[in-house]
Structures are given as C-alpha cells and as structure tokens.
Amino acid sequence: MSERIGTTCVQGGWRPGDGEPRQVPIYQNTTWKYDTSEHMGRLFDLEESGYFYTRLANPTNDAVAAKIAELEGGAAAMLTSSGQAANFFAVFNIAGAGDHVVASSAIYGGTYNLLAHTMKRMGLECTFVDPHCTDEELKTAFRPNTKCVFGETIANPALAVLDIERFAAAAHGHGVPLIVDNTFPTPVLCRPIEWGADIVTHSTTKYMDGHGASVGGVIVDAGRFDWNAHADKFPGLTTPDESYHGVVYAERFGLEGAYITKATAQLMRDLGSIQSPQNAFLINLGLESLHLRMARHAANGRAVAEHLASHPKVAWVRHPSLEGDSEAALAAKYLPEGSCGVVSFGVAGGRAAAETFMKNLKLAQIATHVADARTCVLHPANATHRQMNDAELEAAGISADLVRLSCGIEDAADLIADIDQALAAVE
C-alpha cells in the first residue's frame, strides 16, 4: 500500500512486531556480542548485514535514516553528526584531490566555505555559478574532472530557488550526479529526487528536529545514478576497494546500495562523524509532526512576508511564496504547497537600523539557528556568513542590511505584532 507523506512521517522506518516497543528504541551501546569470530569477520568483509560498532551503523540510526529515505523517495540513507558533515560526506564520497565540483553560489555560508576553502586545501576545486545563470554559463562551468553539481532547494538565507530540473539535466549531460540540500522545504514541501536530483542532504538540526534539541544531518541516495556508465569518473565505486578485500561497491550493492554503503564503509569508518542514537531518537520525534509543522511554518512565513512588504520601514522583502517575488515562478513549480518559514528582508536605514530592530524584538530571539518551532532572527553578514568578503556576500545574494527571520509555529498575529513594535523603535 502506498502511503501519503503524513503517514510516513508518523510510522515510516519502524514497524514493531508483536510485543515490541511502539517507539523506536534507543540502542545506546557501542558494540554487539557474537558467538564466533567468523560471524564478525563476515560483517567486517561486508559479506553479511548486521551491527558490530556504532560508529558504522546502529539500529536506532538505521530506522530513522530509513524513514527519511522513504520521505524523500530515495533508496538508502545515512545519518551524520551534522548537516555540514552530511554535505562534506556527500561530495567527498565521489570527489577528492584533483577533482572539480560545480556549485550554486547562493548556498549557506558554512557550505560555501567548505567547498571554497576547506576542500580546496584538500585538493578539490569548485566553480560557483549564479543559480539563475544562463544555460551557456552553466555549461561552461564544467570541466573534464567535474564529479558532481551541488545546490540548495531554497538557499539559506538568500531564499533563491534552485531550478532542479535544469541543474539535473546539466549534471547528467556531463555524466555526474546532482546533490541537493533540501533542508528548508523538507520532503513535505519538495522532493528533489522527483525532479531529477540524485542525492539529497539535510541538516536535520533544522525543521526535521524542529525544536532546537539535537544536531544532525542525513544523506539520501535516490539509487538511480548509473556509476558503471561513467566508471572512469567514479573509480571509488567501480573499482576494487582493497581496504575491504577488493569489494566493488557498484557490483556488490547495485545502484540502490553502492553510494551509501561506500559512504558508511569508508567515510564513516575513517572520519567517524556518526550521529548519536539519542539524537536520532529526538529527530524521529520531530519527524512525527513534520507534516503538521511545515504547513504552519510556510503559512506564517508568507503572512509575515506580506505584512513586511507593505511596511514603510522595510526596504525590501524576499520570500519565495510572496506574489511578485523574483523566485515566485520557480516556487510555483517546485513548492506549490508553500516554501518555508524563513523570510529575508532589509530594514530601511541599513545595518544600524537592522540591529536596532533585532534588539527590540520580544518574541523572536537572536540566535545562530533557523527553522524550528520558536521564531528566531539573525543578521547573516555578522554571523553565519561573517567569513565571506563583500564580493562573496553579493554572489550569495546577501546584503549588509539582510535580516533573516525564521518564523516558528506561534500565532502569526503575535509575530506580526512583535515585528511592528520592534520596527517602531527604528528611527
């Protein structure tokens, strides 16, 4: 029976048997017991499925990862310790020293820094393109050693909407997968795999957890990209891995299992950015109400954006669902049921006026966070994107006066009243 997404949010990933716990159990342990070393040897050789060390896999994590894979329409998934770890592993699983990546310039500042600087020190080059660049500009960004394309469904905090179909077509035309960070809309409001994306990532810290309680990330593989058809580009998946007695992931695990198995067996084994079972348990609690909360977040975001658009002390407003917004056409295509609760806008008077506005808010709290049940606010140029220079900020769609307001699930009328009294303090 095909289930709707709300049912999957509540019951996906874990179906208890007779007498088993209704809630996903927390396997808060590091290791498992085996009767023979031969059995453990088969696990270490990837000849048999099972658990032997939580750094590689844990039943709690696997249940939650399976739910998220189901929500995204993917074949397999792996939880990570953070959204940053998810994006790093997603790229590094198929691209490393001597390789090249094409990425949208309108992405979260931490991810921009990861690709532009940290991975550059590891020998990987990245070409950033405007998400609304021409087809020719996108085509010329590719090189013979390009291994993937990366973008965000809704950019944080510029709120640019990625034309997923167009970027997927460009990626596939050059024999590489498209990786899409789907943190802001979540699979409730957009499923990038249905539009051609091959790999989807999330910071589960945000809407999936939804309560500011646990840090985490996830990678979902659609299980459709044919690694063997481009074997020369992806030797890590199509040639023997001598650290596992010569296993060839694409052969042993097929299209649906190769990518995530390699990410687990190699990257999680060696780098260890595992999500704790306790955090996975908390994320699952958030997932159970995700379909309900996203509707409220999106409605509040739109209501606040519409109010700000008519306020005399607001210079500009961006929200993909706002009528007349530059992203409205793409939002109508990819996000017809709403986009997210995040609104970006500029207070008339620039940076100083923005700071005055923020410190006078009562309900919305200044926090290095976004996308949870409580409304929060941030000045990205002073915080999350502080390491970027003016040119990089401009390319990412972030101006010095940009305020990022993440609307929670409070009553919209109360949020608007709080905004009005804070704007009244601006000279």
Image (tube, grey):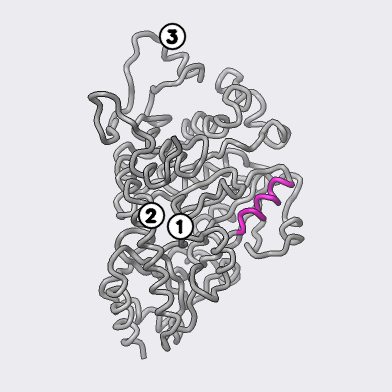
Judge from the rendering whether residue 304 lies leftward or rightward of residue 145; answer left or right.
left
- Residue 141: image x %, image y %? 72, 56
- The amino acid type of the residue labelled 1 equals Phe
Q: CA distance from mark 2 to mark 1?
A: 7 Å
Few, some or many C-alpha atoms within 10 Å of disc 1 (few <14, some 14-19, many ≥20)?
many
- The amino acid type of the residue labelled 3 equals Glu
- In the figure, residue 242 lies in which quadrant? top right
Q: Where are the magenta residues, as a range?
A: 163-173
User: What residue is shown with label 3?
Assistant: 38
Look at 38% across and 8% down and name the residue there: 36
Nearest to N terminus: mark 3 or mark 1 = 3
Closer-to-camera residue (38/210) = 210
Few, some or many C-alpha atoms within 10 Å of disc 3 (few <14, some 14-19, many ≥20)?
few
- Residue 34: image x %, image y %? 34, 13
- The amino acid type of the residue labelled 2 equals Tyr
Nearest to N terminus: mark 3 or mark 2 = 3
Few, some or many C-alpha atoms within 10 Å of disc 2 (few <14, some 14-19, many ≥20)?
many
Judge from the rendering whether residue 197 lies leftward or rightward of residue 282; answer left or right.
right
Which mark identifies residue 207?
2
- In the figure, residue 71 lies in which quadrant? top left
Q: Secondary structure at mark 3?
A: helix
Labelled pair 3, 1 in contact (Cβ < 8 Å): no
Q: Nearer the viewer, mark 3 or mark 1?
A: 1
Q: Secondary structure at mark 1?
A: loop
Residue 172 is a magenta residue: yes
Labelled pair 2, 1 in contact (Cβ < 8 Å): yes
Which mark identifies residue 352?
none
- Residue 122: image x %, image y %? 60, 45
Judge from the rendering whether residue 229 lies leftward or rightward of residue 28; answer left or right.
right
User: What residue is shown with label 1?
Assistant: 184
Closer-to-camera residue (271/31) = 31
